[in-house]
Image: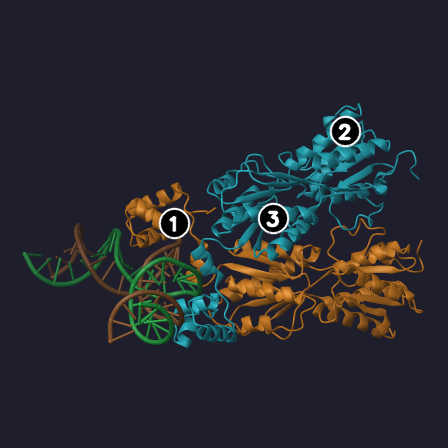
Chain colours: A cyan, B orange, C green, D brown
Amino acid sequence: MKFESITIKDIGKALGLSTSTVSRALRGSYEISSETKKQVLEYAEKVNYRPNPIALSLKERKSRSIGVVVCEIANNFFSQAINGIESIAYNRGYHVIISQSHESYDREVVNVRHLASRSVDGLLVSLSCETTDLTHFINLHEKGLPIVFFDRITNEIVTHKVIADNYQSAYDTTIHLLRNGYTKIAFLASAPFLSITKERVDGYKKALLDNGLPFDEKLVKHCSHGGMIEKEIDNAMTCLLKLKQKPDAIVAATDRITTCCLITIKNLGLSIPNDIAVVGFTNSNIPELFSPTLTTVRLPAFQMGQVAIELLIDLIESKRPVTDFETKVLQSEFVIRESSKPLLVKS
Amino acid sequence: MKFESITIKDIGKALGLSTSTVSRALRGSYEISSETKKQVLEYAEKVNYRPNPIALSLKERKSRSIGVVVCEIANNFFSQAINGIESIAYNRGYHVIISQSHESYDREVVNVRHLASRSVDGLLVSLSCETTDLTHFINLHEKGLPIVFFDRITNEIVTHKVIADNYQSAYDTTIHLLRNGYTKIAFLASAPFLSITKERVDGYKKALLDNGLPFDEKLVKHCSHGGMIEKEIDNAMTCLLKLKQKPDAIVAATDRITTCCLITIKNLGLSIPNDIAVVGFTNSNIPELFSPTLTTVRLPAFQMGQVAIELLIDLIESKRPVTDFETKVLQSEFVIRESSKPLLVKS
DNA sequence: GAATTTATCGGGAACGTTTGCGTAAAAAAT
DNA sequence: ATTTTTTACGCAAACGTTCCCGATAAATTC
């Protein structure tokens, strides 16, 4: 089963012209007579000619496509970010190739290799939670491939980065819970290597310290698979709830962790916020539909995608080597709902 | 900013060999001495040589990549289906390029054109809800490009198709509601052109008729943008609730419609199922977290993706033209929860 | 020792496109 | 009428790879 397309050569043959003439006519070159141009254009239209981007990629050594490396698309944050990416890329004439690591380092390496060999003009990366070795990115970056990191970033590579105000959000979240009377606040975090984890845990810590509370390591649990394995979230939760110093509130640090955490609480028959308050980092569209409605930190996913792709395309299209890089920090949206109601006033 | 890669020519130059020899050595051809082979292999390994798939695509006129055409990935059904697709494609050596139409016909046409010109070896398609004209697919299909439709299919093109048991699910859903004492069951459907809409509405109708109930057109509302515009779902809902014959139950026919419908009900301060029962077609992972928990029809998204890509790759790799096509129907999962509790026993 | 086979490699075309350079004919300038 | 310029087009190389067809030298056969 072969799938044949019309080429410039076919047009040339049909019209008794050389391929160069046809090519130039199609591009509207000034050195082609308007008669010939019209003839070529009309014929091309008639046979529905489409230039072969593969041939172009080979020749130009670029593909007008950019690769996106994320852990999974079945995740509100990333699918929203991808929509942001596409909204800009589309208008600026780039195509987006998405790859999922499913939080696996090996898979990330394979995907990045493939994208690079497919001649993507640049990479938009959010690291997998297993990734500690960055050589697969460093190699490409040193060879001149533009890369922009977003959300889960690294400081081992000097380039543009786009993140949410993770530190501040975690800080605000914790302060909010403290103000509402909660004192034993647990933090259910993602993998320890991830930048988002460090930033969020730091914000949480700082809020505690600023309020004269001790930082209790036992109240911070990490999900080293980023929540891909439900069991690990479950375990972390039961572990937390078994403590003598049982937490009265919990901050869930990612989308997956938030939903899993809610399910565990539900399965245990606990009531929110009476038994335990919950605040979740989640880009879910329906936090109002939970019962009770969920207090959330919503990351500016769409805008993060947009900013990241803008930076990347600027990098790609820059005539001179760029040496001045920036890390953009975008503001999250903190929406207070019922799941973190004041302890004293709870109905 | 150019990004240079090692080519077979570079290797040849470095080793004093011709490109053809290097190529053959890399492929393990028998007509290359084992010495030379070893030398080439070692050098290639050393400089981290990767064959250029673009050049290969150009030569072979195929790319070992398949294009996926869906309306949006920020949708549980489609992201799960894509995971199914990838799980198989990856193992069989194909790469997946995803494109989103955002339910726009024009965008779908552009995406399909681009995928085709990118020399995808085949297409996996779920139609946009605006699509009535299929010539963009027909043209490619007639030229020999393998296409498999899934979920939102068409009968204008003869090929493999994969769907869920939409008719049966809608039938079962309706029967379930009838058995539980609901008699004025509304149906909130997606765009009228879509196969899933027709199949589901038909199942709903049949269940009514089988129970001696009349089919009331006013109780069926269509969302012609597939729910991409929240307002239209809102309007449909308010319209339904304004009827003299106010419905006592509602079947929401897609993911988006289900969540929107729940939000509208919540905003109106109605209680489920006391004021109105709800059953939703949704692949949400958290129907237990809604309040009350939601009775759902969950499509076998992952498996549908798997089956569809299997059929497509078989088509692509088939030596002889395939003339025998099948439409696979996969079973959905109907889970009864609180939102459709029996009318009489409601607490 | 001559003829034939075998082993090992290189040349070059092809995939579809762009583009620098060359050139014939037509037009303009002398 | 000759020279110069312009117009309009073709040739060929290049991008990275594979593969058919030779070609050379060594090894084998008679």
Q: Which residue is mark 2?
A: A207
| Sequence-earlier tag: 2 or 3 | 2
Residue pictured at 75% horizontal, 33% vertical: A171
Amino acid type at circle 2 is: Ala
Residue A19's image quarter? bottom left
SS at mark 3 in the image: helix
Q: Nearer the viewer, residue A177 or B347?
A: A177
Residue A64, percent from left and from top? 52, 55
Of labels 3 and 1, the one closer to you: 3
In this rendering, would A1 be left or right of A73?
left
Q: Given this view, does label 2 or label 3 mark the residue nearer the observer?
A: 3
Number of residues whose C-alpha sits closer than 10 Å to that of mark 1, classed few (under 14), some (14–19) or many (20 or more): some
- The lab-note entry on whether marks 1 and 2 share a chain reads no
Left or right of B338 on screen, residue A192: left
Rendering coords of residue B228 (x, y %): 74, 60
Q: Which residue is mark 3?
A: A310
